[in-house]
Image: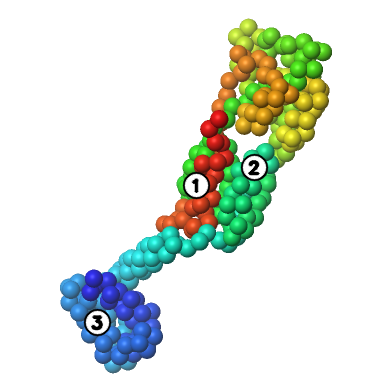
Amino acid sequence: MDSLGALPIFIQAAETRSFTAAGQQLGLSASAVGKAIARLEGRLGVRLFHRSTRTITLTQEGHLFLARCRRILGEVEAAEQELADTHAAPSGRLRVSLPMVGMLLMPAVNAFIQAYPEIEPDLDFTDRLVDVIGEGFDVVLRTGDAADSRLMTRIVGTFHHRLVASPAYLDRRGIPIKPADLAHHACLRHRYPTTGKLEAWPLRQDRMAGTIEPPATVVASALEPLISMAEAGLGIVSLPDFVLHEHLRTGHLVPVLSDHTEDSGVFRLLWPSSPYLSPKLRVFIEFMTANLFPPK
């Protein structure tokens, strides 16, 4: 512990290149600084400074030791901040990036805002691949895999896509029995706004018929209009199951071709790697993990 206490003195002396200047900034005499450095050199068994009547300069060993000392004190300061934050109330601006489908996840976001009124969420809705660190986001919610090694990640839920339509539509156009039947149906397709590509439907490949590409009777760049059109009886749509619970419960939409679909995906939170989490980020991660996809 005596050595640890001498580290700030050594760092200050190395940066000012003067025992006198270091002592003035630390509230010590030049003599006390010199004696602390001498004791440290004695314990280490190396000379840290070249001394002259007017100046001091680091030895090669001193340069090596300075770099390590800065890292050590940085870790100590991070640990102190982490412990202090455990007693601090979560507050302040929280920059969050959500996918466009995040609008359908707003119940959990709304509940978080009500639970932590001192936190000020700044919500960015986009499907583009954001630079979490470069653009200054605290946390992002995305589907798929995590490829950036600079980020920490936590899976907060899984989902599947289902094909659904309204009972009125199926009464009028008939129920498709196999994927090939979709060629004779109105299909409501989602187009990714960032790439312009149509989202693939989760159809199992038919060995005889090959890959089935449903017609694009109507195309939209957001899911909410597709849900509305499907409820209005305008066609069949592929939607993630987390947006369908209420529609299926009420019977406004019913599944089709359930035996011919298969896929799965994950939602994950990603945030910049750090020695500690700020209180606002910690409670956001914990709240979303518990509430974004609650057990049914």
Q: What residue sits 53% from the left and 56% below the top?
A: 280
Q: Amino acid at mark 1?
A: Glu
Residue 50 horizontal side relative to residue 258, left or right:
left
Callout 3, which amino acid? Answer: Ala
Please provide percent x and percent y for residue 110: 64, 47
Quadrant hosting residue 193: top right
Q: Cα distance, mark 3 to mark 2?
A: 59 Å
Q: Residue at x 81, y 23 (%)?
A: 234
> Within 10 Å of the Cα at label 1, are there few (<14), some (14-19), or many (20+) other Cα atoms?
few
Foreground of the two, 222 or 206 = 222
Taking the image as drawn, is residue 146 in sight? no
Q: Amino acid at mark 2?
A: Pro
Q: Is residue 192 left or right of residue 273?
A: right
Few, some or many C-alpha atoms within 10 Å of disc 2 (few <14, some 14-19, many ≥20)? Answer: few
Count of numbered tags: 3
Q: Which residue is mark 3?
A: 36
Observer-nearest residue: 209 or 103? 103
User: Label 2, label 1: how many angstroms apart (C-alpha)?
Assistant: 16 Å
In this rendering, the label closer to the viewer, 3 or 2: 2
Q: Secondary structure at mark 2?
A: helix
Which corner quadrant of the image does residue 87 belong to? bottom left
Q: Residue at x 72, y 11 (%)?
A: 176
Q: Which mark is residue 286?
A: 1
Q: Position of residue 166 (x, y in %)?
A: 76, 20
Instruction: First in sequence, mark 3 or 1: give its number.
Output: 3
